Amino acid sequence: MAKKITVRMSPQLRRNLTHPYLIAAPLKEYLFRATTLIRDEGRAEAPEDLGKMRRSHVALVDPQPVPRWGRMEVKATSKGAPYPLFVHEGTRPHFPPIDAIAPWANRHGIPPYALVMSIARKGTKANPWLERTVEKLRPHLQNLNGLAADIIKKWNKP
């Protein structure tokens, strides 16, 4: 399971791009910077226990000549953890496997059975660190002046 933050351009802007070579490199650079910034800040904001969840943040940019998206995902990878989505979104009451809960509970001095019963009654509270990260970075992400300046420079080249 993956939690995704996607940065997309508007369909109108996409239609207006008649010279792909003018926009491709600056747009790719903007999307790379935006997704990398979200990934790095998201890692810092993510809850930390053993660090697996922080290592599961991945920045991706559409490889097309004119990219349509940049995406930062938190997903289960060989280096990551299988549970980031549940921590981010919270859960409804359920009975988690005690074997999965026991290592965390023991590290935090909580009897595993008591933790399982608490989750069975209340579920788990959401910790939406990605939303907090995007809100914090919104002014930086909305600043497209650098992208516009790069496009103007390329347009004015002979």
Image (cartoon, rainbow, N blue to C red):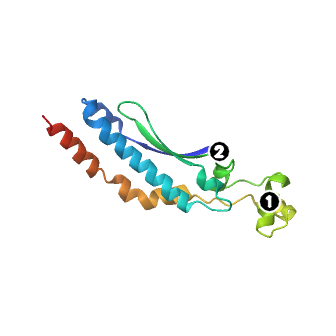
Q: Which residue is mark 2?
A: 76
Q: Residue at x 27, y 31 (%)?
A: 21
| Rendered location of residue 12, percent (x, y) | 31, 36
Q: What is the crowding at mark 2: few (fewer than 14 residues within 10 Å), some, or many (at least 20)? A: many
Disc 2 residue type? Ala
Circle on res. 152:
none
Q: Quadrant of residue 48?
A: bottom right
Q: Quadrant of residue 17?
A: top left
Q: Measured along the vertical axis of the image, is residue 106 above or below residue 24?
A: below
| Rendered location of residue 74, percent (x, y) | 58, 48
Q: Quadrant of residue 150?
A: top left
| Rendered location of residue 1, percent (x, y) | 64, 42
Q: Which residue is mark 1?
A: 103
Rounded to the nearest angstrom, the CA distance separating label 2 from label 1 is 19 Å
User: Which badge, 2 or 1, is on the more N-terminal residue?
Assistant: 2
Taking the view exactly as shown, the residue that stands out farthest to the left is 158
